[in-house]
C-alpha cells in the first residue's frame, strides 16, 4: 500500500481497548496484522539488519551488564548512545519559513528554530517542541520535519529547542533550558507572532519528559502559560520502584513469534536504562522529582490537557497508560493513542512512516480543540 493510502486508512481504522485499565485508542494501518510490525517499519527494520547476522553470530553468548553506577562508564555509554542516534526523514511541508534565534539560559546559549507558515499574518498558537534522545543525544534536525508539518497543518508557530545535553550538562540543565525557552516565547510573543494565550509544549521520548517538566514548572511558578501538552512515547519515571511496578514482561506486548526478535532488544534495553540515565543525566538531583519522573507528581490535576502517544512495541507504553489513567482521574482532559505495529521513536521517520504524520495530525487536532 502506498504512503497516502496508508495514512488515510489510519484515520478511520481505530478501536478502543484497555491498557492498564485505561481506555486507549488503538490505530492500525492497512496490511498490519495483530502482533506484527507495520509493513513500513518491517521494511525499514529488515534494511537495518542487512549484513548484521555475522556480527550477531560472533557475539559472546553471555553478557554482563556494565556498572552504570560508575560515572565514567555511564558517560562512555551515553556518548556511544548519542553517536548511534538520528534518522533521515522527509520534509512534506511547502509553506514554512525558518528563523534561528538564541535564547540566553543559565547554562549558556540555547539555539532555537522558529517555524512560521508563510501566509501567517496574525498571531497564531505556538507549540514548543523538545527533541528526544535519552537526555544525552538527539538534535533538532531529526524532529524538524515533524515540527514543520505541525506549523503548516494548524497553522502554528513551532519552536524547536536545542537544549543542553548530559553528560556534559547534567540535570537540571535540560529542564531549566526548556523552561527558559517557554518564558522567552511569552516575552517575545509579539515579535514571534505568537498568541501568548495559546501555547502548548510537546516532545518525543526524553523530550516528552521535558515537555511534562515544563508544564509542571509552569504551574509551580504560577505563570500558567502552558495550555496543552503532547507527550510522544515519553519517559515518565526514572525510579526503580515504578519500573518494577509498571513495566511489562516481554510477552505482554503480544508480539508474534517471528516479530519478537525484532522488537525484544529495544524493549529490554529501554527497561534496563534507568541506572544509566540516573548516573549520566540526573547525577545529584532527586530522580523522584516530577521534572525527571512525571509519574511522581503528587497532584496530576496541575497538568494541562494532554495528548499521550505510544507505540505498540515500546517499553514505555504501559507507563503512558498509567499516566493517562492518573490524569483522567484528576480531571485532566486526556487522549491516549497507541499505534499498532510500531516501535519507539517512530516520528523520527516522518514522511516515511504514515504513523508519524498521523501523530502530527493528532497534535494539530487537539490544539484546535483546546485553543480555537
Image (cartoon, rainbow, N blue to C red):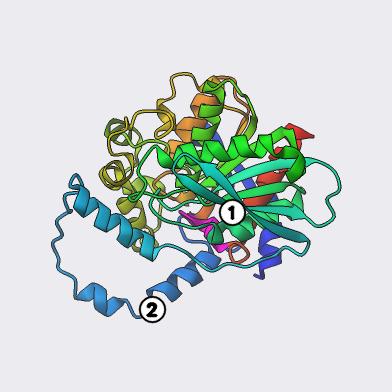
Which residue does the image show at 60% across and 34% down from the upper left?
183
Estimate the x, y position of residue 270 in percent, counting from the top left.
34, 50
Estimate the x, y position of residue 100 in percent, counting from the top left.
64, 56
Q: Is residue 97 above or below residue 121?
A: below
Q: Quadrant of the N terminus?
A: bottom right
Q: Is residue 178 magenta?
A: no
In magenta, the rendered stretch is 342-349
Q: Which residue is mark 1?
A: 28
Q: Is residue 346 magenta?
A: yes
Which residue does the image show at 72% across and 52% down from the upper left?
151
Which residue does the image show at 59% across and 67% down from the upper left?
352
Mark 2 vs mark 1: give the one in front.
2
Q: Quadrant of the C terminus?
A: top right
Query: Crowding at label 2, few (<14), some or many (≥20) Cα neighbours within 10 Å?
Result: few
Q: Which residue is mark 2?
A: 50
Estimate the x, y position of residue 295 in percent, counting from the top left.
42, 29
Query: Crowding at label 1, few (<14), some or many (≥20) Cα neighbours within 10 Å?
Result: many
Q: Please, what secondary structure does the residue beneath circle 1 have?
A: loop
Q: Please, what secondary structure does the residue beneath circle 2 have?
A: loop
How far apart are the alpha carbons under marks 2 and 1?
A: 26 Å
The disc label shown at residue 213, or none: none
Q: Earlier in the sequence, mark 2 or mark 1?
A: 1
Q: Is residue 260 above or below residue 274?
A: below
Amino acid at each position: 500500500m502506498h504512503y497516502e493510502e496508508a495514512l488515510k486508512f489510519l484515520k478511520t481504522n481505530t478501536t478502543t481497548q484497555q491498557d492498564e485499565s485505561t481506555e486507549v485508542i488503538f490505530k492500525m494501518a492497512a496490511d498490519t496484522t495483530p502482533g506484527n510490525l507495520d509493513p513500513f517499519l518491517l521494511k525499514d527494520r529488515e534494511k537495518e539488519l542487512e549484513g548484521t547476522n555475522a556480527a550477531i553470530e560472533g557475539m559472546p553468548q553471555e553478557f554482563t551488564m556494565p556498572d552504570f553506577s560508575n560515572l565514567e562508564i555511564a558517560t562512555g555509554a551515553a556518548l556511544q548512545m548519542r553517536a548511534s542516534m538520528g534518522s533521515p526523514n522527509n520534509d512534506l511541508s511547502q509553506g514554512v519559513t525558518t528563523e534561528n534565534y538564541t535564547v540566553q539560559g543559565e547554562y549558556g546559549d540555547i539555539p532555537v528554530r522558529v517555524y512560521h507558515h508563510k501566509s501567517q499574518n496574525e498571531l497564531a498558537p505556538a507549540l514548543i517542541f523538545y527533541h528526544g534522545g535519552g537526555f544525552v543525544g538527539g538534535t533538532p534536525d531529526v524532529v524538524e520535519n515533524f515540527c514543520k508539518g505541525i506549523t503548516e497543518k494548524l497553522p502554528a508557530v513551532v519552536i524547536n529547542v536545542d537544549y543542553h545535553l548530559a553528560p556534559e550538562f547534567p540535570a537540571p540543565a535540560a529542564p531549566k533550558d526548556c523552561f527558559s525557552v517557554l518564558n522567552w516565547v511569552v516575552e517575545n510573543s509579539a515579535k514571534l507572532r505568537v498568541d501568548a494565550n495559546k501555547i502548548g509544549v510537546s516532545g518525543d521520548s526524553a523530550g516528552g519528559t521535558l515537555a511534562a517538566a515544563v508544564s509542571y514548572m509552569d504551574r509551580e511558578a504560577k505563570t500558567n502559560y502552558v495550555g496543552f501538552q503532547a507527550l510522544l512515547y515519553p519517559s515518565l519515571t526514572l525510579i526503580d520502584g515504578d519500573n518494577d511496578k509498571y513495566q511489562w514482561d516481554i510477552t505482554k506486548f503480544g508480539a508474534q513469534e517471528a516479530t519478537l526478535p525484532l522488537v525484544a532488544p529495544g524493549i529490554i534495553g529501554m527497561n534496563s536504562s534507568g541506572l544509566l540515565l540516573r548516573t549520566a543525566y540526573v547525577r545529584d538531583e532527586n530522580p523522584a522529582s516530577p521534572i525527571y519522573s512525571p509519574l511522581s507528581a503528587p497532584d496530576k490535576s496541575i497538568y494541562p490537557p494532554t495528548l499521550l502517544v505510544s507505540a505498540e512495541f515500546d517499553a514505555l507504553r504501559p507507563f503512558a497508560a498509567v499516566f493517562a489513567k492518573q490524569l483522567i482521574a484528576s480531571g485532566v482532559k486526556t487522549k491516549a493513542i497507541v499505534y499498532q505495529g510500531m516501535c519507539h521513536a517512530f516520528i523520527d521517520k516522518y514522511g516515511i512512516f504514515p504513523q508519524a504524520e498521523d501523530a502530527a495530525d493528532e497534535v494539530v487536532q487537539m490544539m484546535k480543540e483546546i485553543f480555537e
